[in-house]
Amino acid sequence: MTRILSGLPTAVRELLAGTDWGSLQHAYGPAGDIPVSLCSLVDEDAEARSEALAALDLAVLHQGSLYTVTAPAALFVAAILDHPLGVAEHDGHFPWDGGPPRCCEPG
């Protein structure tokens, strides 16, 4: 994660550092695991990006519900949309993701 953080804009690093992720909640409990998934969205490894998007899809976007972690996670995703790997396509992570390649870019 340190390698990824060094390549992110200052505002994104400040969002990560300034958010008390452990005090926030997602669909499965405390959201202390979310920063790793968020940073992995811009990992050079396409499989890591795929796993991260799947984890966020399950925990943060679970059944369209809003959680206390939703807003800071959305701010992070918005901040990386101009990052080359933030919009890089990758295959779906789950067996039922047989559709077209996925990315963070809004479609």
Image: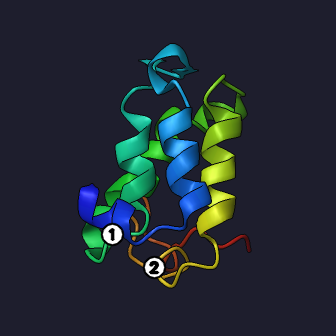
Say which of 53 and 96 sits in front.
53
According to the image, label 1 marks what residue?
Answer: 43
Say which of 35 and 2 sits in front.
2
In the rendered view, tell whether residue 15 sits above or below residue 52. Answer: above
Residue 69 on image: x %, y %: 61, 29
Q: CA distance from mark 2 to mark 1?
A: 7 Å
Residue 61 placement, left or right of 49: right
Say which of 17 and 32 sits in front.
17
Q: Residue at x 72, y 28 (%)?
A: 66
In the rendered view, tell whether residue 6 sits above or below residue 24. Answer: below
At label 1, the amino acid type is Asp
- The quadrant of the picture occupied by the N terminus is bottom left
Residue 65 on image: x %, y %: 70, 28
Q: Secondary structure at mark 1?
A: loop
In the rendered view, tell whether residue 91 sits above or below residue 63. Answer: below
Evaluate if marks 2 and 1 touch, with contact meaning CB atoms under 8 Å apart. Answer: yes
Residue 33 on image: x %, y %: 36, 32
According to the image, label 2 marks what residue?
Answer: 85
Residue 44 placement, left or right of 12: left
Residue 81 appearing in the image: yes
Q: Residue at x 25, y 74 (%)?
A: 45
At label 2, the amino acid type is Leu
Residue 96, quarter of the rendered image: bottom left
In the rendered view, tell whether residue 59 sits above or below residue 87. Answer: above
Q: Secondary structure at mark 2?
A: loop
